Amino acid sequence: MSLIKKLVKLLIFIALVYAVGRFVVVFQGSLLTGYRAPYVQMVTQDSAVIRWMTEDSELGVVRYGENREHMPSIMLEGSSNKNHIVRLTNLEPGTRYYYQTGKVSGYDNRHIEKQWFYTHPDTVKPTRIWVIGDSGDPGPVADQVRDSALNWMRENPITADKASTDAGPLIDIWIALGDLAYTSGTNAQFQAALFEPYSDLLANTAIWPVYGNHDDRRWTYFRVFDLPQSGEAGGVASKTENYYAIDYSNVHFVMLDSQESDRSKTGKMAKWLQRDLAENDKPWVIVAFHHPPYTKGSHDSDEEYDSRGRMQDMREIFLPMLEQAGVDLVLSGHSHMYERSHLIDCAYGSSAEFSEQNIVSQGIEGEQKQYQKPLPLGAHQGTIYAISGSSSKVDNGPMDHPAHHVGLREAGSMVIDVVDNRLTARFINNEGQAKDEFSITKDAEFSSEYQGCNK
Ligand SMILES: [Fe+2]
């Protein structure tokens, strides 16, 4: 046998060993094992999913009702499992339900104080949104970000009556901007970075995530989350958990997958997005995806090889669709800091191509930066882009992208309130300070001087 043939055989053998080894590592890291406290998922107007994990295989039971002392409804699993998934249906909208998990021989009392959830309302009401990004590095910084935001929300209720804990949940919609478990999104890393530090919240508040690059290194993400594929939470059915929509009060949320799904103009995600946005009748639209269209943070959206062009794809292919549909706010992570634009439009090129022509409004200075938009929702009225990717760690970067008005090298998260025709957003740092605050007010009387970009 010639030396070349021997070498080729050796290379094939090495590649095979690597592929098998890689498969074993991915498979093992993705196995759902161990105990996991109960958590709620995919809460809608009339349903919710209750999940938990046990060391032993057992037939799971959930009892639930509107009174903790009296939970008359019971759902039993079809077969014994270690990974328990129970869907509660025929619920009333805007209602607080208490629940308790267990097995046929008895209920688990350990978490009972935290086990409740509110179904989504079928009316318009003040909506508080908590946004964490790149939260997957457990430790003191992540804990500070969590505690400071929760404390801030308790101390600053969205409306006066929300000061009472009986007036509704602290958080109506909880968004995670991807990379929930560093470094590889294994089951153990999800446990350490999400299910343990956030267990008190996960027991009663559904988390709505987008898919990040670190989540994509194992198969855990789609195994631990139940996300709407059939329009269960509102919007058009996406037929995939990779991207989906949520309606809550007067806000339409669109959660895109900038990591794995086809990002081409004629791909399934783009087609679904256009249909979903065309059918939306809510006056506010917030969109989230992991890879930011504009950043000079720990990633650079000008570098076409950074993140294999995903930031560029989202900017060039998806931003025109979003702005055509009048999207108000776009949230991303991936860069581990906070960056935020003015109301901008039609900036689909590199940072060098960004000009003042792309700025719809620089807002009015005050205690908070105030922007105005017309009503109803219309094409190219201006969109604010925010990157909030420092909920567990902060990295370096020049933060000098001309699309951005604010850049903060600080750990934190965002709290966004939508009350009627006003959206107020803040970046709350890990010391509990509101470091950037802006509002968008929509007014039928308002007419913008911005003439549009005609692109
Ligand atoms: Fe990332």
Image: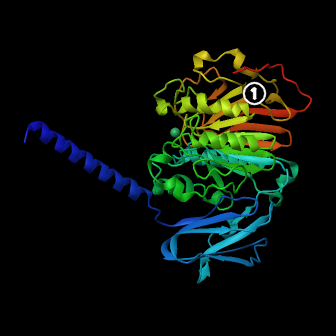
Closer to the camera in the image, 4 or 176: 4
x and y, in percent, of residue 420 in the image: 86, 43
x and y, in percent, of residue 340 in the image: 67, 29
Closer to the camera in the image, 267 or 111: 267
- Of all residues, the one furthest to the left in this rendering is 1
Question: Mark 1 = which residue?
Answer: 380
Image quarter of residue 94: bottom right
x and y, in percent, of residue 214 in the image: 48, 44
Query: Does the residue tagged 1 have its C-beta within 8 Å of any atom of ligand 1?
Result: no
Image quarter of residue 39: bottom right
x and y, in percent, of residue 229 in the image: 63, 54
Any part of residue 46 in sight = yes
Residue in the image at 66% along x and 29% along y: 320
Rendered position, 398 above or below 113: above
Q: How many marks?
A: 1
Any part of residue 431 in sight = no
- Of all residues, the one furthest to the right in this rendering is 445
Horizontal relation, residue 134 to residue 16: left or right: right
Label 1: which secondary element: loop
Three-letter amino acid code at disc 1?
His
- Of all residues, the one furthest to the bottom in this rendering is 105
Residue in the image at 63% along x and 66% along y: 50
Split into 4 quadrants, where in the image is the N terminus?
top left
The colour scheme is: rainbow
Crowding at dot 1, Cα within 10 Å, few <14 / some 14-19 / many 20+, comes out as many
Residue in the image at 44% along x and 57% along y: 30
Horizontal relation, residue 282 to residue 345: left or right: right
Image quarter of residue 205: bottom right
Split into 4 quadrants, where in the image is the C terminus?
top right
